[in-house]
Image (cartoon, rainbow, N blue to C red):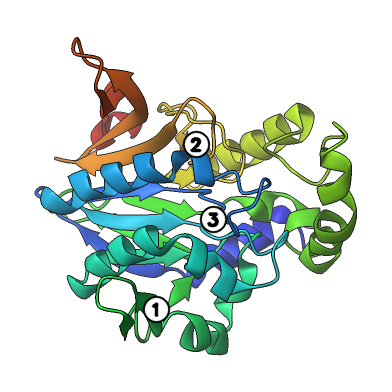
Amino acid sequence: MGFENRIQKTFKNSLRLPLYPYSRYVILSDCHRGCGHAGDNFLHNEYLYIAALKHYFQRGFTYIELGDGDELWENRSMECIKENHKQSFEILSMFYTKNRLYTVYGNHDIVKKYANFAKKYFDSFYYDKMLCKRPLCPDMAFYPGIILHDTLKGHEIFLTHGHQADMLNSTFWPLSRFLVRYIWKMLENLGVPDPTSAAKNNKRKKKTEKKLADWAFKNKLILISGHTHHPMTGSKDSPYCNTGSCVHPAGITAVEIERRAITLVKWSINTRRDLTLYASREILGNVISIDSFF
């Protein structure tokens, strides 16, 4: 199956959500939550991630996690990931309780597409403050993609992880997982980059992004993905946006959709005059109206 067939199949099986003029969505991707060891790239940004999600929760945003939320190629244990990132899962539970959490699976957490996985690992978690188990995200569903349907003008925004553009990370994901888990994970410590990763291989990254942008233009819709860890906003000629990731050393990036406009933002640690640290939100580029893509 070629790339276009894979992405088309994802589109047809996607969850549809309404995009009203007053809707507020925030989209983050590629958290790669790990087991808390030296290879856990999410660890250094976790408090920044929590601060950002608290900001969005208080302001009524719906959170969409666009794949690779958990690093399940390098790590075999989902319980280990939950144990080491309890505060992150606590805030995910807060969004879910308010019906404001939707999740898409990527290649590194593709096993979430199996219903028994969600039932086994997302029903409950251990809540430290009460020293007991509490519901996490009971009956959680993980989707291949999500379509936001603009109720005002009928435009569509397609959200998916983006790994469908790469056969090695989609069709042959078991092989890629094996290579990452047992070979490249060790070689990375010696400075050898992972050739299966679009985020770490510039040639693969550009090829993936071109495929996704061309498909979006051909199908006359806006496509938002993650996967390449390369934050960007598109245009009418290239209606492709990317959320970036939550594992960059300089901070995390996100796409906000509010008042029928798309905004790429960066969250990072800054310092006030009294030398206290705070989480700051910075707009990258311009706020782009959805209508300007069409």
160 w.r.t. 246: above or below: below
167 w.r.t. 141: above or below: above
Q: Give whichever of discs 3 and 1 has the lower sequence position.
A: 3
Q: Position of residue 117 (x, y in %)?
A: 56, 83
What is the CA distance from the residue labelled 2 to the residue labelled 1? Answer: 28 Å
**Which amino acid type is marked by label 3?**
Arg
Mark 2: secondary structure: loop
Q: Which quarter of the rendered picture does the N terminus lie within?
A: bottom right
> Which residue has dot 3 on it?
33
> Which residue has dot 1 on it?
125
What is the CA distance from the residue labelled 3 to the residue labelled 1? Answer: 15 Å
123 w.r.t. 292: above or below: below
* 261 relative position to 187: left or right: left
* 22 relative position to 176: left or right: left
Q: Position of residue 215 (x, y in %)?
A: 58, 44
The local crowd at label 2, few if under 14, some if 14 to 19, many if 20 or more residues have their Cα within 10 Å, is many
Residue 144 appearing in the image? no
Residue 85 appearing in the image? yes
Disc number placed over residue 290 in the picture, else none:
none
Q: Which quarter of the rendered picture does the C terminus lie within?
A: top left
> Which residue has dot 2 on it?
244
Mark 3: secondary structure: loop
The local crowd at label 3, few if under 14, some if 14 to 19, many if 20 or more residues have their Cα within 10 Å, is many
The quadrant in which residue 202 appears is: top right
**Which amino acid type is marked by label 1?**
Phe
Q: Nearer the viewer, residue 12 or 245?
A: 245
Q: Position of residue 216 (x, y in %)?
A: 51, 43
**Which amino acid type is marked by label 2?**
Gly
Q: Position of residue 106 (x, y in %)?
A: 58, 59
Q: Nearer the viewer, residue 61 or 154?
A: 61
Determine whether label 3 and label 1 are within 8 Å by CB.
Answer: no
What is the CA distance from the residue labelled 3 to the residue labelled 2? Answer: 15 Å
